[in-house]
Image (cartoon, grey):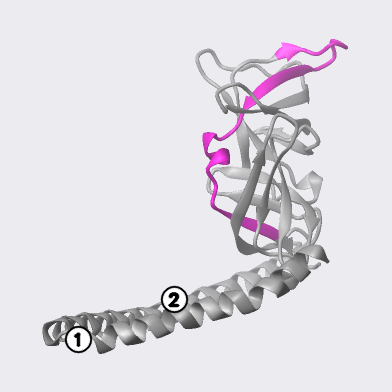
Amino acid sequence: MVQSTFEEFHAPIWEASSRLRDLTHYWGHISDSKNTLIKKGRDHARILADTKIQIERKEELRKEITELRNLKLEINRLEKSLGLSSAFKYSSELSRVTRRTLSGWSQSVEIDKGINFKIREGYGVIFADGIIGRIKKVNSRSSQIQLITNQGFRIVAHLKGDNRPITFRGSGISIGGISYGFISDVPQDVIVPKDNQLEIVSSALGGRFPKGIKIGTVNKLEPSTDGLFQTGKVRLSSKLNEIEEVTILRKDYE
């Protein structure tokens, strides 16, 4: 309520400032010399030409979108004819990062979409390098993402090429800003190839991510305290601290 009141209080000031800038620009144009006006006219012509190109490009993109939609409809038709389940289909919602909190105790980011875009708590969030985290809190026009590095983040995962479930959890950010996680419940027969690494990917068993999205890599496994399984330290993407845009995964049936 205080924040809303604060914004309402400042709204007239921001509007007055905008009008003052417009008035300043107006008197600035009045006092321009003939040569300046000619130069501005040329700039204006270039802007119009660029706008025309962008409009033409927009039409091309519209055609591409139509083709992609038709392709999606064809894929859906084939899936139905083959009797494939659609229980785990996802749609995506692109959002921009507005704030980061990357302390030793809490790793989260805020994005510019919330209830106004039908975002819900628990939705998975990804980016170009794999999983980022999941929606932890939703406001009217923003949401908070609990990062994969957060110690409270846990999901079911797989070793790439192995369908047996393992557990992944965040373990914070170490000195130097390197992001890590931790895996447990790894079967004893799993061996990391010499001078190589294993890739950790998401599992559909968790319910919020489709199967096969990259989480990170592990290059060493050690016996767990109970001696029944193995554990390992997972190195996550170095770009987690630099993300500017994310993709929210929404299940189509929700």
Image position of 157 with respect to 227: above or below: below
Name the residue nearer the viewer: 150 or 237.
Answer: 150
| Amino acid on which the number 2 mark rests in the picture | Glu
| Amino acid on which the number 1 mark rests in the picture | Gly
Point out residue 204 in the picture as x, y percentages from the top left corner.
75, 47
Can residue 5 be seen at all in this image of the molecule?
yes
Tally the marks. Answer: 2
Point out residue 88 in the picture as x, y percentages from the top left corner.
75, 58
Displayed quadrant of residue 85 = bottom right
Displayed quadrant of residue 236 = top right
Which residue sits at x=61%, y=61%?
A: 95
Q: Secondary structure at mark 1?
A: helix
Q: Quarter holding the C terminus?
A: bottom right
Q: Secondary structure at mark 2?
A: helix
Point out residue 30 in the picture as x, y percentages from the top left corner.
27, 89
Q: Which residues are magenta?
A: 222-249
Tell me the residue that label 2 is attached to.
64
> Depth-wise, is mark 1 or mark 2 nearer the camera?
1
- Whether residue 79 is in magenta: the answer is no
Label drawn at residue 41: 1
Point out residue 130 in the picture as x, y percentages from the top left corner.
59, 44
- Whether residue 229 is in magenta: the answer is yes
Residue at the right extreme, as displayed: 226
Image position of 165 with respect to 221: above or below: below
| Badge 1 density bin: few <14, some 14–19, many ≥20, Cα 10 Å | few
Can residue 252 be seen at all in this image of the molecule?
no
Q: Residues under labels 1 and 2: Cα distance?
A: 35 Å
| Badge 2 density bin: few <14, some 14–19, many ≥20, Cα 10 Å | few
Name the residue nearer the viewer: 157 or 153.
Answer: 153
Q: Quarter holding the N terminus?
A: bottom right
Name the residue nearer the viewer: 176 or 240.
Answer: 176
